[in-house]
Amino acid sequence: MGSVLNNFSNDTICAIATAMSDAGIGIIRVSGKNALEICNKIYVSSKKEHNLFSHSPNTIVYGFICDESRVEDEQIIDEVMISYMKAPHSYTREDVIEINSHGGMIVMNQILNLLLDNGCRLAEPGEFTKRAFLNGRIDLTQAEAVMDIISAQNQFALENSKSQLQGKISDKIKGFRKDIIYQMAFIESAIDDPENYDLDGYSEKLKSIVSSLISDISKLIDSSDEGKIRKDGIKTVIVGKPNAGKSSLLNVLTGDERAIVTDIAGTTRDIIEETVRLGDIVLHVIDTAGIRNTDDIIEKIGVDKAKEKVKEADLVLYILDSTSEIDNEDKDIISLCNDKKTVVILNKDDLSDNIKITDDIIRVLFSDYEYDVLPIIKTSMINGNGIEQLKKAVSDLFLNGHIVPKHELYITSLRHKNLLVEAKNSLDKVLESIELGLSEDFYTVDLTGAYEALGEIIGEEIGDDLANEIFSKFCMGK
Amino acid sequence: MVDIREKFDVAVIGAGHAGCEAALACARLGLETVVFTMSADNIAFMPCNPHIGGSSKGHLVREIDALGGEMGKVIDKTFLQSKMLNTSKGPAVHSLRCQADKMEYSKAMKKVLESQKHLFIKQAEVTEILFDEIEDSSNSHYKKKVTGVKIFSGIIYEAKAVILCTGTYLKSRCLTGEAITYSGPNGLLPSNYLSESLLKAGIELRRFKTGTPARIDGNTIDFSKMSEQFGDDPVIPFSFDTNPKDVQKPQVSCWLTYTNEKTHQIIRDNIDRSPIYAGIIEGVGPRYCPSIEDKVVKFPDHDRHQVFVEPEGTFTNEMYIDGMSSSLPEDVQIAMYRSVPGLENSRIVKNAYAIEYDCLCSGQLKPTLEIKNIHGLFSAGQFNGSSGYEEAAAQGLYAGINASMQILNKPELYIDRSEGYIGVLVDDLVTKENLEPYRMMTSRAEYRLLLRQDNADIRLRSKGHDVGLISDEKYDKLVTKIEQIKKEIDRLKSTVVGANKDIQKFMEEHGSSPLKTATSLAELICRPEFSYETLRDIDSNRPELSNDVIEQVEISIRYEGYINRQERQVEQFKKLEHKKIPADINYDDVSSLRLEARQKLKKFMPVNIGQASRIGGVNPADVSVLIIYLDSVYRGNKHED
């Protein structure tokens, strides 16, 4: 069984830790119990000695990487600085060595190959972090955060991941859990030792504690939608009848002429995706083929795809030609929008003497719309009227007009959100039990539920599929 | 001396509450069983409190009964007073408690033992456990195998299994202030040799202490200064097999009084003469069953503590002073007790004392209560570091069954934490480093809404039937009961009453809000102002059902939401319990385990991930490491059941 085990913890791993580019410096990281021994084999000091062992941990050593299998004159690969962090005072809690080389892809690859030849194994994606987790240096949320930082797409995602890495979510969750366990312990003591612990008036006290926990947890849950949007961007679909101005809108938003714009209805048949930055948030905009009942097979595929995309979208930009009448095709489109955050764009505002669609007509048609706010914006793609209003409307719709607060905590993981919702539901049940006048021993059923759900977020409760979860997080090529 | 060898299947050492259940279980399963006792006149003796049951302990007695044990049946025959505790709280914490007639209880249990086929009582001190070394241990983790025991006279009793139920008798000594006697409880003989034999076999022992209050001559007590405590009417029996009619009888009262500031001052003035506070006692005492001096020290702001005065039996005037156990010198005890209202002129028959004894570090046990590495050596009761008669009896039954299953080569009995308090008790003993005598408490059971005393038969009788202690006839009775419950719940859920005039009048009479639409009887039972009984008038098709069926129906309907949610928690729990850890795991291979976790896992050898997660010093990150290790190493052949 030892050999299987070697795959995850017994051997020494290495990888290039910096981006592969012709940068001025590059770092190769080595971790594992043989890190020092292996590196010592390929390191020589300026006096040509393999003396890495003689240096104390946490210092930086100057020297050379040397391939002794080569002919004498070609042995030196690079001039390097080597830092050695002794276990457990390192990122992985194992012996870690970082080789700072002159960078450059060829040199870096040569050093890496040399390490592999001398007994290292190439690290799997995220394996350093996995070791940090397995060795108890970081908890699950922190491990998740490391992965997020590596793949952060924007400044917000990065900031948020960093605060998660510093354990801010853990701290907060731990605080909730402490409050809950204290109340559970009190109830238990009172049940087992009624002589010394008095439950008179306790349910009122518990009610206020639980209510305040619910409100704190709700804030975190609410932050998750916003957090996800700030981190991942908003999936946006532009829909409208053929030639309403969809592709023009995309072009105006991206400031580029990507989509083919013609006067012939149905020119855009493929799905075109663009990323648009709107202040702090990112829209992933999909321009769809115009939706209309069609016999043209190629276009039909595009239309079906468009309908599918609407289902997946966070935001629908529904653009209409305000100079043409509402027809059944529009009604079809509106039926798709009812359960999506939608902005209605009345385009071709420049042709103002011919306007046939008004705000009122739209609001009547959207009588089944599920959200409170339905922004209706008049635009002209010709002169750019209304574009700023459109951007503001989108921002308001998702961020409630918030400006990015620098150090506020956001929940960005769906896993965290689901568990928070579970915890909140359990606490709601506690309040329900108090309202029903049930005795204290019933409260602990749901307090336990909340406590465990919160614990799963930070890995202090062991879900049976935790292992799979970790594997899926780390092995997805990050 | 002539070499006499008696042959038995099982030798049980000790005939206290653990020993009696263990011996009965083995004999009832057809095994030739000998039970050793220091005194055949003190079988199932109660050296401390004169009651059986109480909070969470009552659950244990019910579970013992469900599995085919004896305790519930004997107390039903010999109780003086019976009371269901905590009835103002939810059904999970209701607990039955009976005052026992100590001598009658002991006599009745002895009679059961004597009448049991295959069972033999032997008065003798066992001095040595006999073993064979297992030379080739490649196929098993056992290093030794039990072959029998030797008694003081040198006679050997051969046995395939030995069950240690030595209670508080191993190298025991009793302390009353400066006065120390080297005896077992109540002046009985201690067992002084067995410890050495166990230590020699590599078994780790430790020293615990417990204590008991004074027995006071009832003729010297002024009961008019105390408040009388009555029993319940009607009485609910402990045993599922006792006919409720047989337990309705006149009951004897208990009495409640309180300590006061004067009592506390006497204790504080003499605290340096307490052997614990003076450092004479080395054993660790139970935090949850504290002496009066502990209470006074720990709760300095409490101006009084409850004192229950309870009869020891109908054969004696002695009264047990519950709540005032002590190891203070006798002169302090006299002053202390006499400061309590009603005890001003009291005389002490037997003084309070603390008792110290050798017991097992229970982490050496497997979940079957067999000692790891030693084939056939089981243990139960206070020897395992627990306290209480009920805890002892539960373990005795459990160990007795598992010793028998081993000999009979049948599947072992396993009860997990979601199935019974017994499961919680055994799991806590084998996974936790209990630093004090272990007392059962409702708070130790995570799923207590499911582990109620009222449904112990539904939870555990089938296990008792499987091992062979519950007859087919009794089991069939249970199956019928379960069917009746299900049927009646279905009927109540599907029987709908309309919002007509008669019904609205009925609702008004019971102070309930009028119905808006047709409503099922089940929904009405959920309203606090109604019960199954009060709905009789609007439920014309009601079948005749016994009270215990009605009780289950009512609880199941009324607390359905809570029960369902707790069942979901149990599902989560079971997932980890079902992740087995192979017995041949080498924790040294799992290099990413922290050192402390590795040491603990090696020591406790948990059988599944759930147990591993409950071992102190093993944190969730370690468990994750273990899960990942098992998943990757054993991926091909899944160790799940």
Image (cartoon, coloured by chain):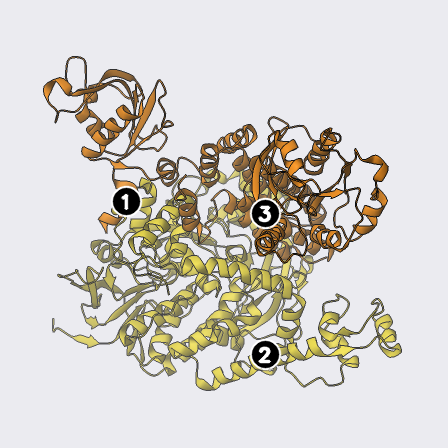
Q: How many marks?
A: 3
Q: Are marks 1 and 3 in contact (CB under 8 Å)?
A: no
The residue shown at (48%, 65%) is B420
The chain in yellow:
B
Separation of residues labelled 3 and 2 (CA atoms):
87 Å
Secondary structure under tag 3 reads loop
Q: Is residue B141 visible?
A: yes
Q: Is residue B55 visible?
A: no
Label 1, residues with CA under 10 Å away: few <14, some 14-19, many ≥20: some
Label 2, residues with CA under 10 Å away: few <14, some 14-19, many ≥20: some
Residue corresponding to mark 2: B247
**Chain name for mark 2:** B
Q: Position of residue A146 (x, y in %)?
A: 45, 34
Q: Nearer the viewer, residue B222 or B5?
A: B5
Separation of residues labelled 1 and 3 (CA atoms):
48 Å
Secondary structure under tag 2 reads helix
Single out the mark in the foreground, 1 or 2: 1
Q: Can you say whether B471 is above or below A159 in the image?
A: below
User: Is the residue at mark 3 from the same chain as the one at mark 2?
Assistant: no
Separation of residues labelled 1 and 2 (CA atoms):
67 Å
Residue corresponding to mark 3: A269
Q: Position of residue A386 (x, y in %)?
A: 75, 31
User: Is the residue at mark 1 from the same chain as the one at mark 3?
Assistant: yes
The residue shown at (50%, 30%) is A162
Single out the mark in the foreground, 3 or 2: 3
Q: Amino acid at mark 3?
A: Arg
The residue shown at (37%, 27%) is A18
Give the colour chain A carries in the figure. orange
Could you say which disc has been placed on residue A7 in the image? 1
